[in-house]
Image (cartoon, rainbow, N blue to C red):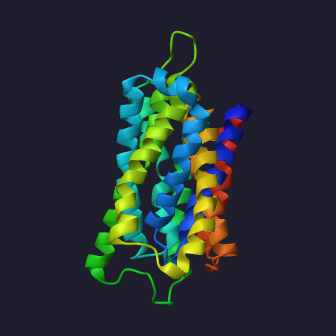
Amino acid sequence: MHSSPLLLAIVSGLLLSLIGIAYGMGRAHQLQSSHIATFMCLAGVPVFSILAGMDMLCAAPPRIWLLGLAAGLSQFVTMRAINAALRRGPLSPVWCAASMTFLPALLYAWVALGEHTSGMRLAGAVLACVCVVLGAVHGSRAKKGDGAGHAHGWRAVVAYSLLLLLIVPTAASLHVSNKILGSQLLPDGRNAMDAFGLVFFLACYGSTGLGLLGDSLVRNPPPRESRRALVWLGLLASIGSIGGFLVLRLAAASPAALVYPVNSVSSLLGVTLASVLIMRERITLAWAGMVAAGVIAVLLVGLS
């Protein structure tokens, strides 16, 4: 049992779930995900700059900066899609779509890197998909009847579904990039994520933040009465985001089937549990099935 990468994946997923929790709690204060994400990026840029140091910033090859910029632009698209989706529906299905990011990462590892996986890990990945689907079903039913924040009519449902589909590949850019750099060995024996991952995240957070800054400050500023809530929710999301990716970076060289399904399931369970305990979403049979599928998926991957 690869306990170290598995533990890193779980801890990272639980930290990353703080982002979704902050997004969900922000709706009660009329804060959109882009407001909180802008705060998160502005916090991440100085943190990653300090952690990287001038020597790493100067030594990083251009491809690290370019990959970070590309991932950041992809995350900007993700933020816009999440923002639009949350105006049309509840938190759980949106975070479920974001939790499907392990699928593109697995596909890249299997096709581009030729990684082989055991039957138990494959079964764990399938159960992770089941967990996500059940989470979406739970989210669509948890607040049924309140009439708020849900898509109505077939056009609205189609629009909401397309937004959820868009979130999957764009949100996956960080997991895929983590795997790309984790698989590239340098002459000194380190992988590229270990050597230059802090520079990658600096470029990613910087480009995402620049894209969101104009929208958050000019076109769609947060309500004045919600700015105090923005600070503490932004700090919550920043801790989860920065901490989550710093931990996930340590498992970049591990097999994708071991790390990313567990990471996504842990994040999803963290958000959904908070939705029930903090945001008072109704517990459903799908919620119980989602929790069971998530726990079994983690056990299958961990015991393989």
State which quarter of the image contains the N terminus.
Answer: top right
State how many labels appear.
0
| Whole-percent x, y for residue 197 in the image | 53, 31
State which quarter of the image contains the C terminus.
Answer: top right
| Residue at 46% over, 86% down | 148
| Residue at 56% over, 62% down | 20
Q: Residue furthest top?
A: 187
Instruction: Please give left or right for residue 70 compared with residue 60 in the image.
Output: left
| Whole-percent x, y for residue 276 in the image | 65, 74
Q: Nearer the viewer, residue 146 or 51?
A: 51
Residue 149 occupies quadrant: bottom left
| Whole-percent x, y for residue 82 in the image | 41, 64
Q: Nearer the viewer, residue 287 or 77?
A: 77
| Residue at 51% over, 70% down | 91
| Residue at 67% over, 59% down | 292
Residue 31 drawn above or below residue 265: below
Q: Residue furthest front?
A: 54
Instruction: Please give left or right for residue 14 compared with residue 245 in the image.
Output: right
Residue 257 showing in the rendered view: yes
Residue 62 drawn above or below residue 68: above
Residue 85 drawn above or below residue 74: below
Q: Residue furthest left?
A: 155
Residue 73 drawn above or below residue 292: above
Residue 182 showing in the rendered view: no
Instruction: Please give left or right for residue 171 compared with residue 5 in the image.
Output: left
Q: Nearer the viewer, residue 50 or 255?
A: 50
| Whole-percent x, y for residue 201 in the image | 50, 39
